[in-house]
């Protein structure tokens, strides 16, 4: 993606930070209570933009069920509450809708199937036994596929269609039936878990159309 953008005279500003999904600034995840502050700073950056941008948004949707909430004006983490599931999903959708209402374009990546195979080890094993001729290999477990489908269906209930919203569903490019691809001619598609390799990311993202956000003629 960076190469494609560079060819068009554009670049990337990364607002990624550890476990912090793009949600409300009173929510945090895992071992990162600073997520609340991170999301406040993200909005400070976004509001400072003077032109329309394209935002690529993804999240570890599986962790939404274990989200914590900062529930006091000073955002101290001394008193930790568990956030309701609905609040977290709604918060993500609200942020996406806010970006769209500001005229930005959003590319939303749906849940990525988690795989159990050690893809790197399996790829090099196959290289050794096949004289470098490695074909398509699928994960033996279907649990990652099933979980991704379940989370995607949940996300569908919160995300509404918009001309400036593009949805990328990794299941569409990674999976056939209930089996998900872990290796192809480009190499291993995963680093571990649900973390895609460069080859995997290229397969999932495909050729995103780098056009300007659509404007309302009225």
Image (cartoon, rainbow, N blue to C red):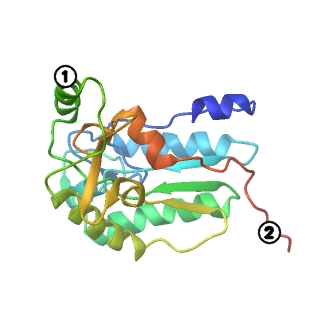
State the count of labels.
2
Q: Report if residue 68 is visible in the image.
A: no
**Which dot marks residue 196?**
none
Residue position for label 2: 216
Q: Which tag, 2 or 1, sits closer to the chain's start? A: 1
Q: Nearer the viewer, residue 60 or 76?
A: 60
Q: Please tell me whether mark 1 sits on a helix, a strand or a loop.
A: helix
Residue drawn at 28 percent across, 66 percent down: 177
Quarter placement of the N terminus: top right
Picture layout, residue 189 above or below residue 101 = above
Identity of the residue furthest to the bottom in this view: 157
Identity of the residue furthest to the right in this view: 218
Q: Position of residue 153 (x, y in %)?
A: 34, 73
Q: For the residue carrying disc 1, how many other residues have a C-alpha within 10 Å: few (<14), some (14-19), or many (20+)?
A: few
Q: Position of residue 132 (x, y in %)?
A: 29, 25
| Left or right of residue 52, residue 111 in this image | left
Disc 2 and disc 1: Cα gap in Å? Answer: 56 Å
Residue position for label 1: 128
Q: Nearer the viewer, residue 134 or 103?
A: 134
Quarter placement of the C terminus: bottom right
Picture layout, residue 86 above or below residue 29 = below
Residue drawn at 36 percent across, 53 percent down: 174
Foreground disc of the pair 2, 1 = 1
Picture layout, residue 177 above or below residue 106 = below
Q: For the residue carrying disc 2, how many other residues have a C-alpha within 10 Å: few (<14), some (14-19), or many (20+)?
A: few
Residues marked 2 and 1 touching at CB (< 8 Å):
no
Residue drawn at 22 percent across, 65 percent down: 146
Q: Report if residue 44 is visible in the image.
A: yes
Q: Please tell me whether mark 2 sits on a helix, a strand or a loop.
A: loop
Q: Position of residue 88 (x, y in %)?
A: 33, 63
Q: Position of residue 183 (x, y in %)?
A: 29, 40
| Left or right of residue 39, residue 82 in this image | left
């Amino acid at each position: 993606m960076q190469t494609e953008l560079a060819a068009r005279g554009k670049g990337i500003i990364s607002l990624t930070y550890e476990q912090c999904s793009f949600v409300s600034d009173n929510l945090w995840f895992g071992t990162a209570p600073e997520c609340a502050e991170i999301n406040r700073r993200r909005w400070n950056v976004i509001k400072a933009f003077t032109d329309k941008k394209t935002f690529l948004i993804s999240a570890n949707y599986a962790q939404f069920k274990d989200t914590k909430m900062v529930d006091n004006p000073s955002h101290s983490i001394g008193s930790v509450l568990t956030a309701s599931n609905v609040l977290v999903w709604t918060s993500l959708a609200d942020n996406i809708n806010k970006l769209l209402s500001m005229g930005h374009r959003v590319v939303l990546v749906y849940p990525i199937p988690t795989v159990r195979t050690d893809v790197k080890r399996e790829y090099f094993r196959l290289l050794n036994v096949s004289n470098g001729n490695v074909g398509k290999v699928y994960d033996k477990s279907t649990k990652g596929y099933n979980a991704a489908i379940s989370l995607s269906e949940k996300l569908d209930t919160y995300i509404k269609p918009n001309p400036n919203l593009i949805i990328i569903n990794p299941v569409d490019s990674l999976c056939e039936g209930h089996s998900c691809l872990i290796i192809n001619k480009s190499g291993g598609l995963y680093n571990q878990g649900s973390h895609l390799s460069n080859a995997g990311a290229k397969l999932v993202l495909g050729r995103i159309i780098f056009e300007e956000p659509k404007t309302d003629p009225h």
